[in-house]
Image (cartoon, rainbow, N blue to C red):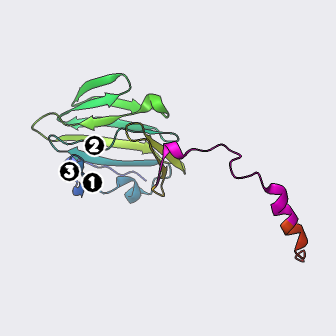
Amino acid sequence: MVQIFNQKNLSFEFERFDMPDFSSHTSPDLAQWVQSKHLQFDVRSLDPDKYSCPYHFHRNAEELFVILSGRATLRTPEGLTELSEGDIVFFGTGPEGAHQLYNHTQEPCRYLDIRTEIGLDVCEYPDSGKINVRPYGEIYRSESKVDYFDGEDKIREKWRELSEKPAQNR
């Protein structure tokens, strides 16, 4: 199947978040229209003086932005860079791929956002110390990390309890 999209023909839905500094207009998930197996993509329009999302990186998803019109400032671990129409930016997995956009201009900035979708992803937010298990949207504080064997010290008691119960027939 071949599907052609043109940004001039797309409709945009306003995404209002609980914090006024974050908002954008997003096209419906175009990848769902074509039933893509491993890509998610949409066109976003970032309003003046707004941030795209909290500064973050993915553990299991790559991302690519293509600036279609306007300008924005990109934040990465290397610092700030101005992006303009025609720029293509790739974000790899891990802390090196951390990113956030801010529209520092008086005009909207439109960009194509393409992401891999291969199951579970962990999205981390360095500024706030949060971890997001996607697609479930389960968000945790990173300082609650524990050792792999935390809480496993009573394994023999658990097995003793289980062995005292009658075995189930198969």
Question: Which residue in the structure is indicated by mark 3?
Answer: 20
Task: Examine the rendered structure and indicate whether residue 35 appears above or below residue 48.
Answer: below
30 relative position to 159: left or right: left
User: Could you say whether the residue bearing mark 3 is in a helix, strand or loop?
Assistant: loop
Q: Earlier in the sequence, mark 2 or mark 1?
A: 1
Q: Residue at x 50, y 43 (%)?
A: 142
Q: Is residue 154 magenta?
A: yes
**Residue occupying image coordinates x 40% and y 58%:** 32
- Whether residue 54 is situated above or below residue 136 in the rendered picture: above
- Left or right: residue 170 versus residue 111 is right
Q: In the image, which is nearer the foreground, mark 2 or mark 3?
A: 3
Q: Secondary structure at mark 2?
A: loop
Instruction: Name the kind of residue labelled 1 in the image.
Output: Ser
Q: Amino acid at mark 2?
A: Ser
Residue 55 rendering spot, x and y as whole percentages: 35, 38
Does 49 appear in magenta? no
Mark 2 crowd level (few <14, some 14–19, many ≥20, 10 Å Cα): many
